Image (cartoon, rainbow, N blue to C red):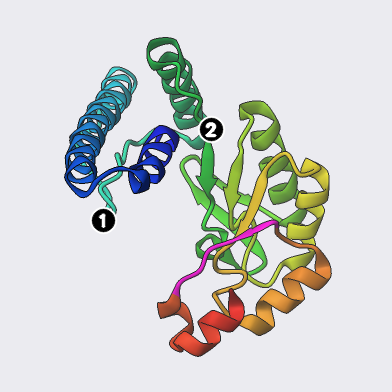
Amino acid sequence: EDTDLVFDIRTAQNLKENDSLQLEVSLQNEYNKKLITKFKKDGDITHLAKNLVIKRDNTWDGELTDEKAICPSLTTEEILELLKEVKDKTFSKYKIHSELGLDAASSSLWKNKKYYYRNPEKKRNEEEQFEYLKGIINNYGLFYVEDPFHEEDFNNFAKLLKETKGKSLICGDDLTATQPTRLEVAIEKKAVNAVIVKPNQNGSLIDTKRFV
């Protein structure tokens, strides 16, 4: 969206000082308009998602997570169906291409060599977890999947990355934990094609720089 602004700023170098100042103000005003438009679109999209949740989950009371995300009682599949509808309507209205992603946070589900799901209640072993995530990626065209397996399961990360053939970002957060040594293992095993960098996970800016 901002490519034209970059071009104009570069051409401003050839103008007189007063002209450059006027151009910068003009660009800032144009940027503010784009920012307002973006916020309006984001607000419309969020409003659309909330309305769909209200229609499909009559128990939702407006509760949000700590990260201000909508927190309905729908299943994973129901939420992905809803988001897929939001994605299609967003493209129809704004011609904005968007992609669906999922943070599985699987380490939080992993206990006694099983993944424990609460909605609906179900236990999955490692093989079942792999098939489940593979099915979700294929059925909903997920572009991004974060921590699909627990933090020590480099092999299934690698297997899923190979299965998706580079069409999805298989991202490590808990898997790599911004630790250079864990990243080296992930690279060696070809476990991920994306990572999250969190200096607070590492505790050292020097080691974080090494990780990057």
* Residue tagged 2: 99
Q: Position of residue 47 (x, y in %)?
A: 24, 25
In the displayed orientation, state which residue is furthest to the front.
16
What residue span does the magenta drawing correspond to?
193-198
Q: Position of residue 185 (x, y in %)?
A: 75, 76
The relative height of residue 91 versus residue 125 in the rendered view (above or below) is above
**Furthest residue to the top?**
92
State the residue at coordinates (60%, 83%): 210
Frontmost of labels 1 and 2 is: 2
Give the secondary structure at mark 2.
Answer: loop
Which of the two discs, 1 and 2, labels the residue nearer the N terminus?
1
Asked whether 180 or 103 is in front, the reply is: 180
Q: Which residue occupies 82% across, 68% down?
A: 189
Q: What amino acid type is highlighted by mark number 2? A: Glu
Labelled disc at residue 66: 1
Magenta segment's dominant SS is: loop
Q: What SS does tag 1 mark?
A: loop
Residue 39 pos. (x, y %)? 24, 33
- Give the residue type that dot 1 points to: Asp
Residue shown at the point (45%, 72%) measured from the top left? 198
